[in-house]
Image (spheres, grey):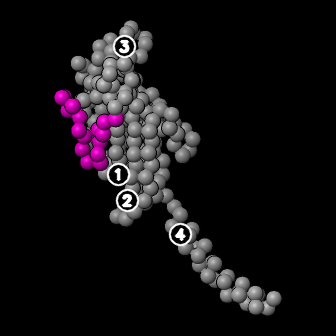
Amino acid sequence: MRKSRKLAILMLPILAAYVFQATQYARAPVKYNLYVVYAKNADIALKPGTDKSPNGQTLLQNATTQQGLYNLSLGQWGPGYRVNYTDAFNVTNNEAFAIRMIAFNFSSDSTGKAYLNIYVLNDTDDDGYGDTEVLVWDGSSSVLTSTNYIYFKATATYGTSGGTSRIKVMVKIPETGVNLDTYTGTIYMWFTST
């Protein structure tokens, strides 16, 4: 009995140091809040996807402080995290003509964009739903152009939805060299008629 008490007393400082060290690194201060801008003079709808942020709300929400903007909140993540939102939000064409997404970029003051990969599902069979994944943002640039675009089918009649594509967002934060901060910015999507 005495030997086990001595062993327990010797183990207490080691256990306390271990607990302190474990709690010292258990924080996730990297936070993403991005604005999403779309065409104000077109009938293009942005709708929340099925993915939820860590607070239980949809990732895409109306930004009540600025007109015409949506807030995309990707949560708080720490170094070494990889998070994949397969249905972050949806883009739907409500126009009576087909449209193409020809550009996808960030504002110059956006931060943390190097840690993001963004995919859009392209409608390759003209059924109105995106079916082929296209990497539109690789962390530094977009591959979309007027000849390499995302297609959205026209709506059959006004008041109904046309082509819809899901937007997928992958957050990849490296384990080292990360500035632990809140990342913010604005995403721009550019559309044209076919």
**Given contact means CB atoms under 8 Å apart, are the residues at marks 2 and 4 in contact?**
no
> What residue is at 28 percent from the left and 36 percent from the top?
104
Magenta span: chief secondary structure: loop
Q: Is 137 left, or right, of 183 in this rendering?
A: left
Neighbor class of circle 4 (other Cα within 10 Å; few <14, some 14-19, many 20+) is few
> Which callout, 2 or 1, points at the residue further toward the start of the chain?
1
Magenta stretch? 133-148
Q: Which residue is mark 1?
A: 115
Quadrant hosting residue 3:
bottom right
Q: From mark 1 to mark 4, how far is it between C-alphas?
A: 24 Å
In the rendered structure, which amino acid carries the disc numbered 1?
A: Tyr
Q: Is residue 27 left or right of residue 131?
A: right
Residue linked to disc 4: 24
Q: Quadrant of residue 106?
A: top left
Query: Crowding near pointer 1: few (<14 within 10 Å), some, many (20+)?
Result: some
For the residue pair 148 and 60, the one nearer the viewer reads as 148
Q: Residue furthest right?
A: 1
Q: Which mark is drawn over residue 155?
A: 3
Q: Is residue 140 magenta?
A: yes
- Residue 2: percent from left, percent from top: 79, 91
Pointer 2: what residue?
174
The relative height of residue 99 versus residue 158 in the rendered view (above or below) is below
Quadrant containing the N terminus is bottom right
Amino acid of disc 3: Thr
Mark number, residue 47: none
Q: Are marks 2 and 1 in contact (CB under 8 Å)?
A: yes
Residue furthest to the left: 147
